[in-house]
Amino acid sequence: MVDIKYYLEIAKDETKLAFSNNKMLLFISILLFVIPVIIGYFYANEISEYIQPMVDSFEQQVEEGTISLTTYSIFTNNVSVAFILYALAALGGVLGAVILANNGLFIGYYGVDFDILAYLVLTLPHGILEIPAIIIATTGGFVLLSFILHFIWGLISPDLSYLDIFDPYFSNVKITTKQRFYAAFKKNQNKLKESFIFLCLSVILLFIAAFIEANITLPLASWLFSIFGLSLV
Protein backbone atom coordinates (compact mmCIF):
# COMPACT_ATOMS: atom_id res chain seq x y z
CA MET A 1 0.00 0.00 0.00
CA VAL A 2 1.31 3.44 -0.97
CA ASP A 3 1.99 5.65 2.04
CA ILE A 4 0.68 8.99 0.74
CA LYS A 5 1.59 10.78 3.96
CA TYR A 6 5.22 9.72 3.54
CA TYR A 7 5.43 11.10 0.01
CA LEU A 8 3.66 14.31 1.04
CA GLU A 9 6.28 14.79 3.74
CA ILE A 10 9.04 14.33 1.18
CA ALA A 11 7.34 16.81 -1.16
CA LYS A 12 7.00 19.33 1.68
CA ASP A 13 10.66 18.98 2.67
CA GLU A 14 11.88 19.27 -0.92
CA THR A 15 9.70 22.35 -1.48
CA LYS A 16 11.00 24.03 1.67
CA LEU A 17 14.56 23.27 0.58
CA ALA A 18 13.90 24.70 -2.91
CA PHE A 19 12.67 27.96 -1.39
CA SER A 20 15.57 28.06 1.08
CA ASN A 21 18.19 27.51 -1.63
CA ASN A 22 16.76 30.13 -3.99
CA LYS A 23 15.70 32.95 -1.69
CA MET A 24 17.54 35.60 -3.69
CA LEU A 25 15.98 34.61 -7.02
CA LEU A 26 12.55 34.52 -5.36
CA PHE A 27 13.13 37.97 -3.87
CA ILE A 28 14.14 39.34 -7.28
CA SER A 29 10.98 37.88 -8.83
CA ILE A 30 8.84 39.46 -6.11
CA LEU A 31 10.41 42.86 -6.74
CA LEU A 32 9.92 42.46 -10.50
CA PHE A 33 6.20 42.11 -9.84
CA VAL A 34 5.51 44.35 -6.84
CA ILE A 35 7.37 47.46 -8.04
CA PRO A 36 5.50 47.53 -11.40
CA VAL A 37 2.17 47.10 -9.53
CA ILE A 38 2.97 50.26 -7.56
CA ILE A 39 4.10 52.09 -10.71
CA GLY A 40 1.00 50.96 -12.60
CA TYR A 41 -1.31 52.24 -9.88
CA PHE A 42 0.34 55.56 -9.01
CA TYR A 43 1.63 56.47 -12.49
CA ALA A 44 -1.29 55.25 -14.58
CA ASN A 45 -1.47 58.39 -16.70
CA GLU A 46 2.21 58.24 -17.59
CA ILE A 47 2.09 54.60 -18.74
CA SER A 48 -1.44 54.52 -20.21
CA GLU A 49 -0.15 54.63 -23.80
CA TYR A 50 1.84 51.47 -23.13
CA ILE A 51 -0.62 49.50 -20.97
CA GLN A 52 -4.02 50.51 -22.35
CA PRO A 53 -3.68 48.35 -25.50
CA MET A 54 -3.14 45.33 -23.21
CA VAL A 55 -6.26 46.24 -21.22
CA ASP A 56 -8.29 46.67 -24.43
CA SER A 57 -7.08 43.30 -25.72
CA PHE A 58 -7.96 41.60 -22.43
CA GLU A 59 -11.45 43.12 -22.30
CA GLN A 60 -12.05 42.17 -25.94
CA GLN A 61 -11.09 38.57 -25.20
CA VAL A 62 -13.55 38.51 -22.29
CA GLU A 63 -16.34 40.00 -24.43
CA GLU A 64 -15.71 37.54 -27.27
CA GLY A 65 -15.62 34.60 -24.88
CA THR A 66 -11.97 33.75 -25.59
CA ILE A 67 -11.48 34.13 -21.85
CA SER A 68 -14.51 33.03 -19.85
CA LEU A 69 -15.14 32.75 -16.13
CA THR A 70 -14.88 28.97 -15.96
CA THR A 71 -12.30 27.02 -14.02
CA TYR A 72 -10.97 25.42 -17.21
CA SER A 73 -10.71 28.66 -19.20
CA ILE A 74 -9.09 30.62 -16.39
CA PHE A 75 -6.70 27.79 -15.55
CA THR A 76 -5.57 27.17 -19.14
CA ASN A 77 -5.06 30.91 -19.72
CA ASN A 78 -3.09 31.44 -16.51
CA VAL A 79 -1.05 28.25 -16.77
CA SER A 80 -0.01 29.19 -20.31
CA VAL A 81 1.25 32.52 -18.92
CA ALA A 82 3.11 30.63 -16.19
CA PHE A 83 4.81 28.31 -18.71
CA ILE A 84 5.76 31.29 -20.88
CA LEU A 85 7.26 33.06 -17.87
CA TYR A 86 9.10 29.89 -16.87
CA ALA A 87 10.48 29.28 -20.37
CA LEU A 88 11.51 32.88 -21.05
CA ALA A 89 13.15 33.27 -17.65
CA ALA A 90 15.12 30.09 -18.37
CA LEU A 91 16.13 31.24 -21.86
CA GLY A 92 17.91 34.35 -20.71
CA GLY A 93 15.99 35.90 -17.87
CA VAL A 94 15.34 39.31 -19.40
CA LEU A 95 12.20 38.43 -21.38
CA GLY A 96 10.73 36.55 -18.42
CA ALA A 97 11.43 39.55 -16.20
CA VAL A 98 9.77 41.90 -18.71
CA ILE A 99 6.58 39.80 -18.95
CA LEU A 100 6.37 39.43 -15.16
CA ALA A 101 6.78 43.20 -14.81
CA ASN A 102 4.10 43.74 -17.47
CA ASN A 103 1.69 41.60 -15.44
CA GLY A 104 2.43 43.78 -12.43
CA LEU A 105 1.89 46.98 -14.41
CA PHE A 106 -1.39 45.60 -15.78
CA ILE A 107 -2.77 44.74 -12.34
CA GLY A 108 -1.77 48.09 -10.86
CA TYR A 109 -3.06 50.06 -13.85
CA TYR A 110 -6.33 48.15 -14.09
CA GLY A 111 -7.22 48.95 -10.48
CA VAL A 112 -6.99 52.73 -10.88
CA ASP A 113 -10.55 53.20 -12.19
CA PHE A 114 -12.15 51.19 -9.37
CA ASP A 115 -12.80 51.77 -5.71
CA ILE A 116 -9.73 50.25 -4.07
CA LEU A 117 -11.67 48.17 -1.51
CA ALA A 118 -14.01 46.82 -4.18
CA TYR A 119 -11.04 46.00 -6.41
CA LEU A 120 -9.35 44.10 -3.61
CA VAL A 121 -12.54 42.16 -2.88
CA LEU A 122 -12.70 41.13 -6.54
CA THR A 123 -9.04 40.15 -6.82
CA LEU A 124 -7.75 38.94 -3.45
CA PRO A 125 -9.76 35.69 -3.04
CA HIS A 126 -8.05 34.14 -6.06
CA GLY A 127 -5.17 36.60 -6.43
CA ILE A 128 -3.70 35.57 -3.10
CA LEU A 129 -2.77 32.29 -4.85
CA GLU A 130 -2.60 33.38 -8.49
CA ILE A 131 -0.05 36.15 -7.99
CA PRO A 132 2.41 34.02 -5.96
CA ALA A 133 1.96 31.29 -8.58
CA ILE A 134 3.22 33.43 -11.47
CA ILE A 135 6.05 34.77 -9.31
CA ILE A 136 7.02 31.20 -8.39
CA ALA A 137 6.86 30.12 -12.06
CA THR A 138 9.25 32.93 -12.99
CA THR A 139 11.54 31.99 -10.12
CA GLY A 140 11.55 28.41 -11.41
CA GLY A 141 12.68 29.70 -14.80
CA PHE A 142 15.50 31.66 -13.20
CA VAL A 143 16.56 28.54 -11.28
CA LEU A 144 16.56 26.56 -14.53
CA LEU A 145 18.70 29.27 -16.12
CA SER A 146 21.08 28.97 -13.17
CA PHE A 147 21.24 25.20 -13.73
CA ILE A 148 22.00 25.68 -17.44
CA LEU A 149 24.79 28.20 -16.77
CA HIS A 150 26.36 26.10 -14.01
CA PHE A 151 26.04 22.98 -16.15
CA ILE A 152 27.86 24.65 -19.06
CA TRP A 153 30.57 25.86 -16.72
CA GLY A 154 30.82 22.32 -15.36
CA LEU A 155 31.51 21.06 -18.87
CA ILE A 156 34.24 23.63 -19.38
CA SER A 157 35.79 23.20 -15.95
CA PRO A 158 34.60 19.87 -14.56
CA ASP A 159 34.58 19.15 -10.85
CA LEU A 160 36.50 15.87 -10.78
CA SER A 161 35.35 15.08 -7.25
CA TYR A 162 32.07 13.91 -8.80
CA LEU A 163 33.90 11.25 -10.86
CA ASP A 164 35.03 7.84 -9.70
CA ILE A 165 38.71 8.56 -10.25
CA PHE A 166 41.31 7.82 -7.61
CA ASP A 167 43.05 11.03 -6.57
CA PRO A 168 41.71 12.82 -9.69
CA TYR A 169 43.56 16.10 -9.22
CA PHE A 170 46.94 14.35 -9.34
CA SER A 171 46.27 11.63 -11.90
CA ASN A 172 47.06 11.75 -15.59
CA VAL A 173 43.70 10.22 -16.48
CA LYS A 174 42.05 12.12 -19.32
CA ILE A 175 38.35 12.41 -18.66
CA THR A 176 35.91 11.78 -21.49
CA THR A 177 33.12 14.03 -22.73
CA LYS A 178 30.61 11.65 -21.18
CA GLN A 179 32.34 12.02 -17.83
CA ARG A 180 32.24 15.81 -18.17
CA PHE A 181 28.49 15.68 -18.74
CA TYR A 182 28.05 13.30 -15.82
CA ALA A 183 30.09 15.42 -13.41
CA ALA A 184 28.37 18.66 -14.48
CA PHE A 185 24.91 17.13 -14.13
CA LYS A 186 25.71 15.38 -10.85
CA LYS A 187 26.93 18.62 -9.31
CA ASN A 188 23.96 20.72 -10.40
CA GLN A 189 21.07 18.26 -10.54
CA ASN A 190 19.44 19.74 -7.44
CA LYS A 191 18.94 23.03 -9.27
CA LEU A 192 17.09 21.22 -12.04
CA LYS A 193 14.91 19.43 -9.50
CA GLU A 194 14.18 22.67 -7.64
CA SER A 195 13.22 24.36 -10.89
CA PHE A 196 10.61 21.68 -11.61
CA ILE A 197 9.35 21.90 -8.02
CA PHE A 198 8.65 25.61 -8.52
CA LEU A 199 6.87 24.95 -11.81
CA CYS A 200 4.71 22.15 -10.36
CA LEU A 201 3.82 24.24 -7.31
CA SER A 202 2.84 27.10 -9.60
CA VAL A 203 0.50 24.86 -11.61
CA ILE A 204 -1.15 23.53 -8.43
CA LEU A 205 -1.71 27.04 -7.06
CA LEU A 206 -3.09 28.23 -10.40
CA PHE A 207 -5.61 25.40 -10.50
CA ILE A 208 -6.88 26.24 -7.00
CA ALA A 209 -6.94 29.95 -7.88
CA ALA A 210 -8.90 29.26 -11.08
CA PHE A 211 -11.51 27.29 -9.15
CA ILE A 212 -11.86 30.10 -6.61
CA GLU A 213 -12.10 32.79 -9.30
CA ALA A 214 -14.73 30.89 -11.28
CA ASN A 215 -16.88 29.74 -8.38
CA ILE A 216 -16.25 31.79 -5.25
CA THR A 217 -14.86 35.28 -5.99
CA LEU A 218 -17.95 36.83 -7.61
CA PRO A 219 -20.56 35.38 -5.19
CA LEU A 220 -18.34 36.39 -2.26
CA ALA A 221 -17.84 39.87 -3.74
CA SER A 222 -21.59 40.32 -4.30
CA TRP A 223 -22.27 39.32 -0.69
CA LEU A 224 -19.61 41.70 0.67
CA PHE A 225 -20.80 44.50 -1.62
CA SER A 226 -24.34 44.15 -0.27
CA ILE A 227 -23.19 44.08 3.35
CA PHE A 228 -20.71 46.98 3.21
CA GLY A 229 -22.38 48.97 0.45
CA LEU A 230 -19.36 48.81 -1.84
CA SER A 231 -19.37 49.65 -5.53
CA LEU A 232 -16.79 49.28 -8.26
CA VAL A 233 -16.44 53.04 -8.79
Image (cartoon, grey):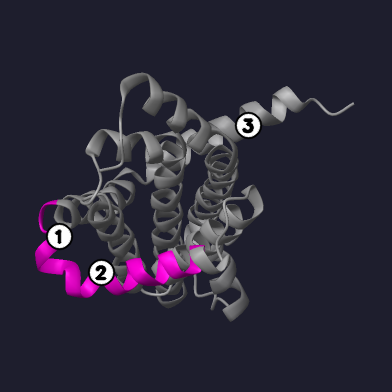
Q: Is residue 54 magenta?
A: yes
Circles 2 and 1: CB distance less than 8 Å?
Answer: yes
Task: Give the crowd class for mark 2: few <14, some 14-19, many >=20 residues within 10 Å.
Answer: some
In this view, the residue farthest toward the top is 227
Task: Give the crowd class for mark 3: few <14, some 14-19, many >=20 residues within 10 Å.
Answer: few
Q: Which residue is mark 3?
A: 10
Amino acid type at image mark 2: Ile
Q: Which residue is mark 2?
A: 51
Amino acid type at image mark 1: Ala
- Of residue 173 and residue 94, the one placed in the foreground of this image is 94
Q: Is residue 119 left or right of residue 72?
A: left
Q: Which residue is mark 1?
A: 44
Mark 2 vs mark 1, CA separation in Å:
9 Å
Q: Is residue 65 magenta?
A: no
Amino acid type at image mark 3: Ile
Marks 1 and 3: which is nearer the front? 1
SS at circle 1: helix
Query: Relative to 106, is 200 above or below?
Result: above
Residue 32: which quarter of the image?
bottom left
Query: What span is in magenta?
Result: 42-62
* Residue 215 position in % (x across, y down): 59, 37
- Of residue 45 and residue 202, the one placed in the foreground of this image is 45
Task: Give the crowd class for mark 1: few <14, some 14-19, many >=20 residues within 10 Å.
Answer: many
